[in-house]
Image: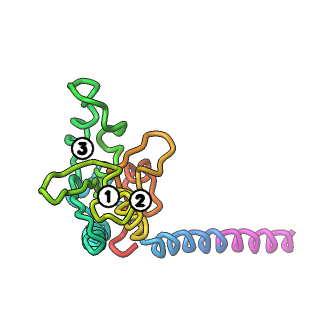
Amino acid sequence: MRAAFSRMSWFVFLASAGGLFLYSLVETMDRRSNIYEVEEGSYPSELHPTVEKKKDELIELAAERGIDVVITDGFRTIEEQERIYEQGRLREGDIVSYARGGESYHNYGLAIDYALRTDEGNVVWDLERDDNGNGEADWVEAAEIAKDLGFEWGGDWSSFKDYPHLQMDFGLSIRQLQNGKRPGVNP
């Protein structure tokens, strides 16, 4: 009986130690991935610093190729996203978003929208325009630069094509963001 109890105690000890090891491994993985948690329903109020930096790099690198990229949208509040969602549904206009408030990477400071500026100063959403005359559409060139910087381009999506949209999700889904997970500053 005593030997059985000792073996049982040893098993409980090992199981507990293993549990602690796994817990500390999961904690370490969260630290390594640079993901942190905030109170559910807590939203940022500006672009994530990495997205902000990469946005500026996009504008600069595109300019070096003779492409004038204009950022038309960045961080959006939940209320702004709801108004955009209502367009084409409750208000006049075409549907431009399938994301309600809290369902867009814009709401978490992780997305931007872009357009092109012509030599005359007009902002255009022309996917075929080639102002730098290199035989490639400036819009697609800008998207390729953005992807090289780590952005995901909405023009690559298989369902709803969102050509002006660029986002960095840092491996986080909308559900995870809604539940309070956030990318760290240096992901």
Q: Do tag 2 and tag 1 residues touch (Cβ < 8 Å)?
A: no
Type of amino acid under label 3? Ile
Which residue is found at the position 23% from the left and 28% from the top? 93
Rendered position, 99 above or below 154: above
Viewport quadrant of the N terminus: bottom right
Which residue is found at the position 33% from the left and 72% from the top? 185
Disc 2 or disc 1, which is closer to the eye?
1
Which residue is found at the position 43% from the left and 63% from the top? 170
Q: What main secondary structure does the magenta stretch of the protein show?
A: helix
| Magenta highlight range | 1-16
Q: What residue would you read off at disc 1?
A: 130
Q: Position of residue 23 (x, y in %)?
A: 56, 69
Q: Earlier in the sequence, mark 2 or mark 1?
A: 1
Q: What residue would you read off at disc 2?
A: 169
Type of amino acid under label 1? Asp
In front here: 117 or 37?
117
Q: Is residue 13 highlighted in magenta?
A: yes
SS for tag 1? Answer: loop
Disc 3 or disc 2, which is closer to the eye?
2
Q: Position of residue 187 (x, y in %)?
A: 40, 72
